[in-house]
Amino acid sequence: MKWLQYLETYNISFNIKILNTEDSIIINKNNYAVYIIDGFMQKLQVFTNKETLCTQLLYSNHILEIFKLTQNKLCLNRNYSYKFVALKKTIILIVHKKEFINKSNKYNQLIYSLAYFKLIYNGDILAIISHKNTRKRLIQFLFIIIERLGIFKKNRFLIPFNLPHSTIATIIGSQRITVNKIMNKLKKERILFYSNQKISIINIIKLIY
């Protein structure tokens, strides 16, 4: 909770919100920074034609930003907005960026910059969409979630929160019906078990190959 201590030390105002699964926040202005204290979220790019694209997976200690680089300046793209959706119970901290910068010393502004740098180069989505095959995309996604959030219990890897097929489809850039078919096949191959939207990996070796 170093961020909370720091904000209190410099008398910087902030809000804390608790998001339940599937709760979302929409950011269309660049006045605030949102810091994930604990949780897991997906960042959706929502276009004016209602098309959505998952651009990042966000975990504890990430900062939610909405900037793009144009002509060497950070600016807001008005052709779309960003929607951040909690994929499990998530605690976020909201701070006004101008106040943060004005009251922070240079060292802590550097910490903020490094946290933002970490966000920009989050490569999980790139690792997923680098595969053309949908099954391989889904498997890559499962490996990422197991590595970052999974629990090993009773000789199997458990993902300790619900993952509907529709959510998986959005993240890997596919259709729910396609994800459903692949998941059923993985179940028949006794690679994983899926019940009540929870996934457990029974045979990690077979999942690899």
Image (tube, rainbow, N blue to C red):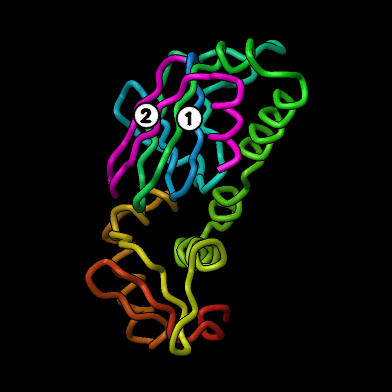
* Observer-nearest of 121 and 101: 101
Relative height, residue 163 to residue 3 (above, below): below
**Residue 102 picture location, percent across and down:** 63, 10
Q: Residues within 10 Å of mark 2 (few under 14, many from 20)?
A: some
* Observer-nearest of 132 and 43: 43
Name, please, the residue furthest toward the left.
Answer: 196
**In magenta stretch: residue 153:** no
What residue is drawn where x is 55% and y is 17%? 97
Chain-order first, disc 1 or disc 2: 1
* Observer-nearest of 189 and 109: 109
The magenta segment? 1-29
What residue is drawn where x is 54% and y is 55%? 128
CA gap between label 1 and label 2 equals: 18 Å
- Quarter of the figure that contains the N terminus: top right
Label ID, residue 56? none
**Residue 193 picture location, percent across and down:** 34, 80
**Residue 151 picture location, percent across and down:** 47, 73
Asked whether the residues under the numbered discs 1 and 2 touch, taking CB atoms below 8 Å apart as contact, a structural biologist would say no
**Residue 63 picture location, percent across and down:** 55, 34
Relative height, residue 27 to residue 166 (above, below): above
Relative height, residue 38 to residue 95 (above, below): below
Residue type pointed to by label 2: Val
Q: Is residue 16 left or right of residue 61?
A: left
Residue annotated with mark 1: 34
Q: Residues within 10 Å of mark 1 (few under 14, many from 20)?
A: some
Q: Is residue 128 left or right of residue 112?
A: left
* Observer-nearest of 156 and 178: 156
Relative height, residue 155 to residue 13 (above, below): below
Residue annotated with mark 2: 46
Residue type pointed to by label 1: Val
Name, please, the residue furthest toward the right.
Answer: 107
